[in-house]
Amino acid sequence: MTMIFGVPLAVFMGQLMLGLINGAFYALLSLGLAVIFGLLKIVNFAHGAMYMLGAFATLLGMRYLGIGYWVALLLVPIVVGGLGMVIERLILRRIAHLDHLYGLLLTFGLALIVEGTLINVFGVSGSSYPTPAALQGGFQLGFMFLPTYRAWVLVAALAVCLGTWYVIERTRLGAYLRAGTENPALMQAFGVNVPLLVTLTYGFGVALAAFAGVLAAPLYPVSPTMGSSLLIVVFAVVVIGGMGSILGAVLTGLGMGLIEGLTKVYYPEAANTVIFLVMILVLMLRPAGLFGKEA
Amino acid sequence: MTFNRKTLASSIALAATTMMATGAQAEFSDNEVRIGYLADMSGTYRDLAGPGGLEALRMAVEDFGGSVNGASIEVFSADDRNSADVGANTVRGWVDERNVDLVAGLVASSVTIAVTKVLEENNGLGIVSGSAASSITNEHCTPNHIHWVYDTYPLANGTAKAVVDQGGDSWFLLTADYAFGHALEGDVERVVTENGGTIVDKIRHPFPTSDFSSYILQAQGSGAKIIGLANAGADTVNAITAASQFGVVQGGQQLAGLLIFLNDVHAMGLEATQGLLLTTGWYWDMDDEAREWAERYYERTERMPTMVQAGIYSSTMHYLKAIEAVGTDDPMTVKAKMAETPVNDFFSRNGHIREDGRMVHDMYLAQVKSPADSTGEWDVYEILATIPAEDAYRPLSESQCDLVQN
């Protein structure tokens, strides 16, 4: 059997595949964060809670309203994104002129409230959500058994990432957005409704998190704490990629998924730490992040 | 002579405080019995003890009458957030500022080991109900704590032995990388090899972990017949979920969950867990006495109790009866009384507290029912065998505890 650093080739390939899937997940979540930070300069610590709400809405929608997976995939991001817009309008807007730190603390507090409330109601054990019928089973790839659902997660996450990047970097709407954050007063003078643009952008970032939550529901037990553990990793990804860089967030997300996957084979004890090691190295050598422009 | 006067004054002060201290020990200190409940109230282990365990403790206090020989019983609680530092500092505060008489709950083994050291330094008393590590009454034993519900030794003795006996003789171990996981891993390795099996490989995963797919894939590649899960709580749930997604059972391998709680099975559902073998210290539906108590508990919480929650009630009751009998809350006197009284109640059968602090009692080998065999939401286990108290736990002849004369 071919071995790579003492690991059979088949196992190695399998780990790369899983790393890529997890990476696509990180990419999707860090993309939302990067959009919100890049365009609104809000360090959104409520992102994990919004991801968790996405998964919960999917679960509860099925349990109480009979809403299936495919409908949830479309509906849940809209509903949770709408909630995000309400939060932006009612709460975040009031501190928009203050230092970033206030936004960070405010969103962190919001996340704790949402999480704590759901823990009180549902406990932490989590509930399982069935894999949709069309995506059950899996492929025998030779080197591993790949569940169909995981393959779908990879495709869906990458498609949404690319679409978002295209809208923001290549379309007129994206140009408005970028200009609006660069110089809001001037854009306002041109007749563009900047506050509305800001609300929509925050809502969109939150909707991305909720979309990731729907994708996660059949993969992991749906529990109120599912967001907080992931959030820290995702923030590290954004910092490594360069705060606010959209392409950076996507590529770094994929890369970190791979690095973490390989760590799980060669030194599993460090699997939860390795991303932070990379973060420290990047901050020492390139403080603006791998793809960041501002120092 | 100012020097002498000062010395005299401080000697008198010292003598007076010493007398006050000893004087107080003859009765209940501050004429109140204070029980502090420390557990994970919001994280991974919340549902196996957590607020439900606090409710069981309050239920015991209420059933006892709310006071002992005229002294009222005060109950307070804190969340240790599974951090040994937080737990140890909380208990230090309870000892210094609130004069706590008993620390109950105690879930994550790492927290328990730190807290029992604090109790030993301050001559306190703790009853450990949630923790699993058998080292708590072995190399980490203290005269100041009792371990009540179960530990990793009977878990391995029960489940691992049963699995090896059924032909599952090659194992791949997935271990939570902290004190509890290490203790369980050691106990399982011993039982598997003693019974003629082998450990093919093992992985220590960080605690907590949400995505187990990578480890499951490695376990599949190992060719072992059994994938042993030396973890607990959400980690076990996540591992079993990942295993079902990657077709572990269809691939011809079996899972062995070494520490599975009622709430875990309830959360995952019988479809995903049916057939799983496990060892438990108690099950709500195991007989009339257990059912009667469990139904009273259910009325308060709308959940059936885990073995840990039942153990918290049982141990608190045993403690309260002991302080009533000896008329003091002095830790060593109370512990001696508890140790000389056999423990036979709805929870414990043939139970007694050994000199290493281990409360040994009958344990049970159980199997998760199939959805077809289950008559209700909480009807999930079938008890296959009773493991008698004397066979279940580590024999004192093998103990490394300083309190045991070997």
Image: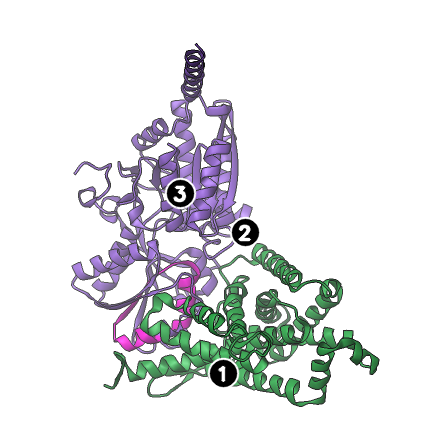
Chain colours: A green, B purple
B260 left or right of A161 in image: left
Q: Give the foreground label among 1 and 2.
A: 1
Q: Give the foreground label among 3 and 2.
A: 3
Tell me, yes or no, if residue A144 can be seen here.
no
- The tag earlier along the polypeptide, 3 or 2, is 3
Whether pointer 3 and pointer 2 mark residues with C-beta atoms closer than 8 Å, the reply is no
Q: Position of residue B378 (x, y in %)?
A: 46, 57
How far separated are the C-alphas under marks 3 and 1? 45 Å
Verify whether residue B82 appears in magenta.
no
Element under disc 2? loop
Residue A52 image label: none
Residue A154 image label: 1
Q: Position of residue B35 (x, y in %)?
A: 47, 35
Residue B115 image label: 3
Residue that appears at 53% across and 57% down: A123
Q: Disc 2 marks which residue?
A: B302
Q: Quadrant of the C terminus of chain B?
A: top left
Q: Give the foreground label among 3 and 1.
A: 3
Three-letter code, disc 3: Val
